[in-house]
Image (tube, coloured by chain):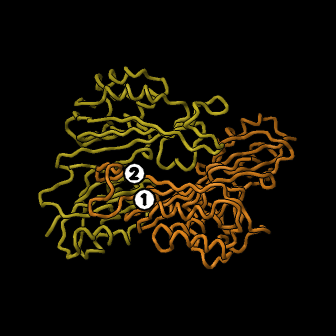
Chain colours: A orange, B yellow
Amino acid sequence: MKRIKLTISYDGTNYVGWQVQKNGIAVEEVINKHLSKLLKEDITIVGASRTDSGVHALGNVAIFDTNTRIPSGKIALALNQSLPDDIKIVKSEEVSAEFHPRYTDCTKTYQYNILNSRVNFPLQRLYTDYVYYELDVEKMRRAAEYLIGEHDFKAFSSAGGQQKSSIRTIYNIDLSFEYLNLPDGANPSKRKEAENGDFLPKLVHITISGNGFLYNMVRIIAGTLEKVGMGIYPPEHVKEILDSCDRRLSAPKAPARGLTLLKIEY
Amino acid sequence: MKRIKLTISYDGTNYVGWQVQKNGIAVEEVINKHLSKLLKEDITIVGASRTDSGVHALGNVAIFDTNTRIPSGKIALALNQSLPDDIKIVKSEEVSAEFHPRYTDCTKTYQYNILNSRVNFPLQRLYTDYVYYELDVEKMRRAAEYLIGEHDFKAFSSAGGQQKSSIRTIYNIDLSFEYLNLPDGANPSKRKEAENGDFLPKLVHITISGNGFLYNMVRIIAGTLEKVGMGIYPPEHVKEILDSCDRRLSAPKAPARGLTLLKIEY
């Protein structure tokens, strides 16, 4: 018997999330089915992060135990032959029998992506939240700094999470953006304004890493930083929200499609 | 009566292409329906580029004539309220009654995107072709240089095009790539090889501009450059293919999903 760790990438658009639900197909369900068929064993994987419906992953992690003779490193390739296009295994490797993806200390990194533009460009729609009003990324950056470190993030979590403590440590929040390649032919890097005096369309990336996240925490942080970027909250208000431990003060959670679990490092 | 020019962005995944077909929904059909409803006139737009089924656009162009009192610049915004998420109008503007999007000289720019990786990452799948074998971008660049300039591109076009002459001018072909953000946490920009000695996953972009393109020309060029990148053809072979004017010597056309019409400049 050996324990295999899978690193998994998926497009969450068409799934009810990682975990099995009654109302649709779950990512873990699809992997269980294909793994069981491939290995001719009854496999139930245990995932590190139970991402919500519509959330994407570049590198979620799961484990399972098997007696297969297929070399550990080859399971990814074999499984990818039969998996659907929107779920692929990035890596398969043997780990110690004690390794548990949820009870082992780790750093999780998420990215929240925002299309900030007067036009909701179709090619970005599946992987971004759409914000019509101009976002001031520098203000969002200042607001995000209040969240770095060990804090009680109760104000930034939805009810329904299974964790007992709401104290978590955020190691870093990076705010970056890039201008969109525009069809009108102008080179956006040389311009500050679009032709009509409006702002230039951009993609904003919030990259956030920590030792764990509460239920909906990254999406509530993203929604709150969007309000700061739009000028609805001053950056300092984020500290007040944090200190209040009151969920009613933070913004509604931003949509699932903007969120991608980038990686989990043990 | 005024003539309006639309700049249009769409995700071609769910359409049979720009032009009305019997076997599914066409992009122009959707826009005609929504425009006619908005303006309360029977509108039939005339497109600049009849992109194939599955091909995307950041900025295709179309015109129509109307008596509407809605200000020309506001039509985009009004139309976007009702259009589906995968078709949006980037800009609407009045042009002279003589302007015709197909018979006016222009520069068209297309981008062909390739995911070059051992893993077919799900988040890129809708907008890239997938190539499993490592692509040598420098070789592709050398091969592409033979295509720049005025040439008879008969060897790079499918039968069925409506154009009389197969002579076109390619102004530029740019080959670029970026490493993918990897879930294993390593910073790809500092590494040349993945952990297992394999190559690092990358996105390759072929950006090509010219005064017009023959039927399937960009996709056949992309397919041919992929073969060069894989080492199947030496770069010099592209010149032989070009000189032969023989379609049988070039590669099969690369898939539609990798192709995006970036812009049309008049």
Q: Nearer the viewer, residue B73 or A229?
A: A229
Q: Does A163 appear above or below A107? A: below
Which residue is disc 1 drawn over?
A122
Residue B116 % position (x, y): 52, 37
Label 2 and label 1: CA atoms lie apart by 9 Å
Q: Mark 1 lies on which chain?
A: A
Residue A15 falls left or right of residue B251: right
Instruction: Name the amino acid, label 1.
Output: Pro
B198, above or below B47, in the image: above
Q: Which residue lies furthest to the bottom in this view?
A: A248
Residue at position x 53%, y 68% from top?
Answer: A235
Residue B167, located in which quarter of the rendered image?
A: top left
Q: Which quadrant of the figure contains the N terminus of chain A?
A: top right
* Dot label at residue B56: 2
Residue A44 visible (yes or no): yes
Q: Identity of the amino acid at label 2?
A: His
- Give the answer, above or below, for where B172 lies relative to B37: above
Can residue A50 be seen here? The reply is no
Q: Do the residues labelled 2 and 1 touch (CB within 8 Å)?
A: yes
Q: Position of residue A11 (x, y in %)?
A: 58, 54
